[in-house]
Amino acid sequence: MLKLKLLGTGTYLPELILTNEMLSQIVETNDEWITSRTGITERRLSSGEPTWHMAVRAAEKALAASGLAANDLDLIVATSVTPDYFFPSVSSIVQDEIGAANAFCFDLNAACTGFVYAVDLAARYLNTGDIRNVLVVSAENVSKLTDYTDRATCVLFGDGASAAVFSAGSPDDESCLLASHLGTKGEGGKYLVSQALKINHPFIENDQVWPDRFGHDKGHNLTMEGNEVYKFAVNAMTESIKAATEKAGIKLAQIKYIIPHQANSRIVDASARRLKVKSAQMISRVSDFGNTSSASIPICLDEIIRDDRLKRGDLIAICGFGAGLTYGAAILRY
Ligand code: COA
């Protein structure tokens, strides 16, 4: 058990709404197919606001809710598969924009599982006693990597950002990270791919060109083997939640809310059935926001805190899966 107190959360969602109807104007699809196969009815898209901007807006809200000043932050971890620059990192830009001069900053790429990995990392840093306050910010413009001529993927994703401020709390606080279970299956990396830059300098000779490791030919645009990811997702979610609850020594029924990665409502429902948890225990906002990668879990977390569904002392599980293939679950007492 690691001391971990969630002090405040905040979300930024772009205003532009992309409906199923709008998608059916540009690819051969329809609302019936999309809602029945994914549960998604609309998603938000950036109108051009960069990832760093969304991260900053979410971070400002989380900081305001936490009651801390920017100078109180010791560490900023940003999670994003869609940064605006290779460097500086999203977290460095957030630090500059919010004026968190005392924080050291780095980005973490665990794809859609990024927030779960970052919370686990924050808890471990905080429990060293060396630092007091951590901002985790997850910001994604998945639209950057989306091919809007590919109906199999373009209906799934959306943009958004969300942030959370954590501290170790005071000695009498009950808030904590009870247990986590993180994993990666590198052999499944080929199922979700987006390419970065290729080697291209003036001294390269034609016969030295390497084929793409994954046979990927769509550049930054993501490719996905949906059925493989689906099977992986349901297994990864159920196994990691079971492993984390076992480690924590609690029963699933004691968890008030499970916040799964929001990729597809069928994945959420299938996981709930396998875990034999009530559907009211599973938080799902996939219908309105689609898959916002690492931002999807904190967006839901922020919502249940702001509408007062989550009370101090409640247990929650956060659980993600994504490219890598990464997966993981963490159980927190709020
Ligand atoms: N509209 C209409 N038809 C579509 C379509 C769309 N947007 N996308 C695919 N289809 C078609 C396919 O071409 C296929 O047609 P065919 O039978 O003539 O070949 C048919 O629908 C069935 O496709 P299939 O891929 O088997 O559908 P599915 O029921 O497996 O659902 C996904 C596809 C992508 C929704 C599902 O596999 C999924 O959600 N996977 C996980 C994806 C995910 O979570 N990714 C992110 C991980 S972080």
Image (cartoon, rainbow, N blue to C red):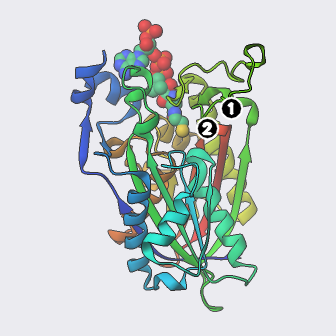
Identified at 21% across, 28% down, the residue is 21
Q: Nearer the viewer, residue 242 or 304?
A: 304
Q: Position of residue 249 (x, y in %)?
A: 72, 65
Q: Identify the amino acid type marked 2.
A: Ala
Q: Describe residue 184's horizontal placement relative to residue 41 as left or right.
A: right
User: Where's ligand 1: which quadrant?
Assistant: top left
Quarter containing the N terminus: bottom right
Q: How many marks?
A: 2
Answer with the quarter of the image where residue 63 lies. bottom left
Do labels 2 and 1 touch, CB within 8 Å? yes
Secondary structure, mark 1, is helix
Q: Is residue 264 visible?
A: no
Q: Earlier in the sequence, mark 2 or mark 1?
A: 1
Q: Is residue 90 left or right of residue 152?
A: right
Amino acid at the residue labelled 1: Gly
- Above or below residue 52? Residue 155 is above
- Could you give the CA–CA distance between mark 2 and mark 1, rounded to whole angstroms? 6 Å
* Label 2 SS: helix
Residue 119 location (% of width, % of height): 61, 64
x then y, percent, for residue 244:
69, 57
Mark 2 CB near ligand 1 (8 Å cut): yes
Q: Which mark is residue 308?
A: none
Which mark is on residue 189?
1
Residue with the mark numbered 2: 323
